[in-house]
Amino acid sequence: MTTNLPAPAAASAPGVAAARYPAPARWLIAVITTARPRQWPKNLLVFAAPLAGASLGRPNGLAYALVALAAFTAASSAVYFVNDVLDAERDRRHPDKRNRPVAAGTLPAAHALALAGICVTAAAAAGFWIGEPGLSAAVGGYLTLSLAYTLVLRALGGAAATRVPPSGFFLLVCSLGALMVAVAKRSMELAVLGPDAASHRPVMRWYSAAGLRLSQRLLAVAMVAAYVLWAAGEHASWARTWHLASALPLAAALVRFGQISGGAARRPVEDLIARDPAMVCCELTWLLMFAAGLGAGL
């Protein structure tokens, strides 16, 4: 049986804090919260093709990549607006998700859907605005699939906007990373909800903690292997050396990610990645080594 939970408004600490602000400010806070700003860094994958290819492609390629970034930010926000409306009833029975603005009633469902429509229109128009239908096609694919983990489409959108052919192995790294995060989220959700997991998300009855942990480890190994294969294919010896070496901090980061996402953490996966000191240290080390390799071609 599902445990009875307190009413969302009474239990929502963010809602209580927001009550100090005027109504328009509370509405704006609810909109921003629903759009999931902490998820926006995922859209930086539009720079994957230019970075992996060590080229900005067409003239003013950076500006076009920034348009792709804005388009996918709007598209991903639209998906969250719609998902929160569809999941509102189920979210109200979740110990943490009941505090989401739509579920808690601080953002009316009609407003969320209207904002989703505006975001979809802006995102779809971006590619035609810069004369790159390929970007609009990638955004359309993302919106059609409505999957939070289709990061590869972001990478393809950046490649289309900058006219840099995407690397197959680099896209595989992005895809495996997205799938690994998805598995980690399900594992943490299963640990938090316990026996009530299936009542919140029916598919959870087919998951097991051991199976999810094994899947996450296998995906991490495959991700590092794909990254090494991509790095080994670099033409410049400087870039190849640094990018191969950067696989070490990447592997360390994935090991640490497996450790911190293995329990019943109540925080989002993105918070674990951004706030764990050891994880951040590995990420920064990888970024510096990756950037050093790019210096050979940019």
Image (cartoon, rainbow, N blue to C red):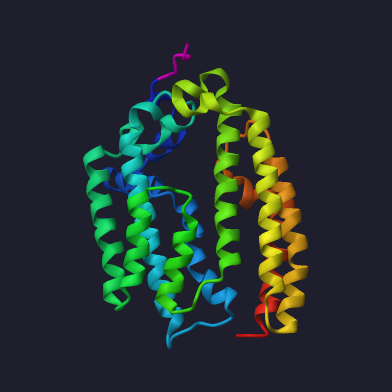
* Lateral position of residue 1 relative to residue 30, left or right: right
In this view, the residue in front, 215 or 86, is 215
Residue 16 spot, x, y in % from top left: 41, 33
Main SS, magenta residues: loop
- 280 or 187, nearer to the observer: 187
Asked if residue 75 is positioned above or below residue 21 in the image, the reply reads: below
Is residue 84 visible in the rendered image? The answer is: yes
At a point 67% along the width and 36% down the height, the residue shown is: 213
Q: Which residues are magenta?
A: 1-6
The percent coordinates of residue 201 (x first, y second) are: 45, 28
Q: Measured along the vertical axis of the image, is residue 92 above or below residue 152?
A: above
Q: Quadrant of residue 76?
A: bottom left
Residue drawn at the location 48% of the way across and 52% of the way down: 39
Residue at the (37%, 52%) spot, across then down? 77
Count of marks placed on residues? 0
Where is the C terminus found, in terms of image quarters?
bottom right
Measured from the top left, where is residue 248 in percent x and y?
78, 61
Q: Magenta stretch containing residue 76, yes or no?
A: no
Single out the residue that lies furthest toward the bottom: 59
Residue 4 on the magenta segment:
yes
Relative image position of residue 58 (x, y in whole percent): 44, 86
Asked whether residue 106 appears in the rendered view, the answer is no
> Residue 259 falls in which quadrant of the image?
top right
- The residue drawn where x is 44% and y is 37% is 14
- Among all residues in the image, which is located at the extreme top? 1
> From the viewer's perspective, is residue 159 above or below residue 249?
below
